[in-house]
Amino acid sequence: MNSKVSKADADLRKILAEKRIKGIEDKRVGSEVFDKQTLETLYKLAKMGYIKQLYGVISTGKEANVFRGLDDHGNFVAVKIYRITTSDFKKMKNYIHGDPRFRVRTSNKRQLVTAWVSKEYRNLKRAHDVGIKVPKPLIAKNNVLIMEFIGDDQGNPALPMQESVLSEPQKVLNKVIEYMKKLYKDAKLVHGDLSGFNILINQGEPIIIDISQGMVLDHPLAMELLNRDIDNIVRDFNKIGIKITKDQIKAKIMD
């Protein structure tokens, strides 16, 4: 192990010991996810009461890991930490620069990730405020987003639709289309990456997640992204025997 990794692991152990963030199960992610500034951000969030303990990974993606945590009141929270070293900066730059809510004109990777996290927070809030079931966003700071935990009272996370057996798939599809319509009509957004991988099933109900690249309707890519979302939903529900066409879904959204 090189000295750089050793120092990162030492920093992680120190902050876990001194700053009330403890219990991470997979230490292998430490040097990749928990750089010095991320640890400092987690410390600040801990002091604010958003994190008391941080446990194992719920999900791992190319750009971010989501951890299960506890806040000062003993409530489970989801802690999404974007990795500065492995994020797709070209994609982030394209989606942020075309969004009129942001004026990021920088090639600084950390600043770009911070803007991306803020974008996800704001998209979640807009969706939540119009009644779409998404994880309620709690706070965004630097490369860390803390939001409502979706799962049971024991801390077991809800599974993605792609890994779930749906007892009422038609009901789930109807609700997903309703949320797509609310997102478009009321929140003035399109998801941009909607599929069975980004829909959690919690007690039979769909929950929309991973809305970081969601776009406002006046973005030049908005309709392209909406059509892609519709194609994905048609494909995923056709696979489980629910027949619906792209035109049918689009008509419901635009109605």
Image (cartoon, rainbow, N blue to C red):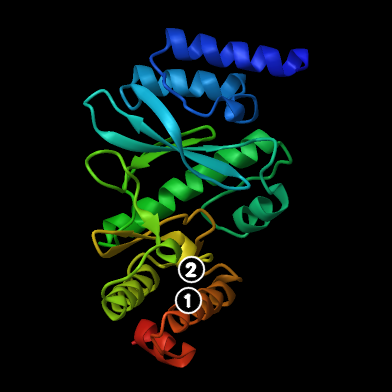
* Amino acid on which disc 1 is placed: Asp
Percent position of residue 234, x then y: 47, 82
* Amino acid on which disc 2 is placed: Ser
Percent position of residue 9, x then y: 62, 16
Is 139 situated left or right of 170 in this image? right
| Disc 2 versus disc 1: nearer the observer | 1
Is 12 situated left or right of 204 in this image? right
Q: Where is mark 2, residue-wise? A: 195
Local SS, label 2 = loop
Local SS, label 1 = helix
Query: Which sits in the foreground, 154 or 205?
Result: 154
Q: Quadrant of the N terminus?
A: top right
Determine the residue positioned at 47% across, 80% down.
Answer: 239
Q: Is residue 252 above or below residue 15?
A: below
Q: Residue furthest right?
A: 2
Q: CA distance from mark 2 to mark 1?
A: 7 Å
> Which mark is drawn over residue 119?
none
Q: Where is mark 1, residue-wise? A: 236
> Looking at the image, is mark 2 or mark 1 earlier in the sequence?
2
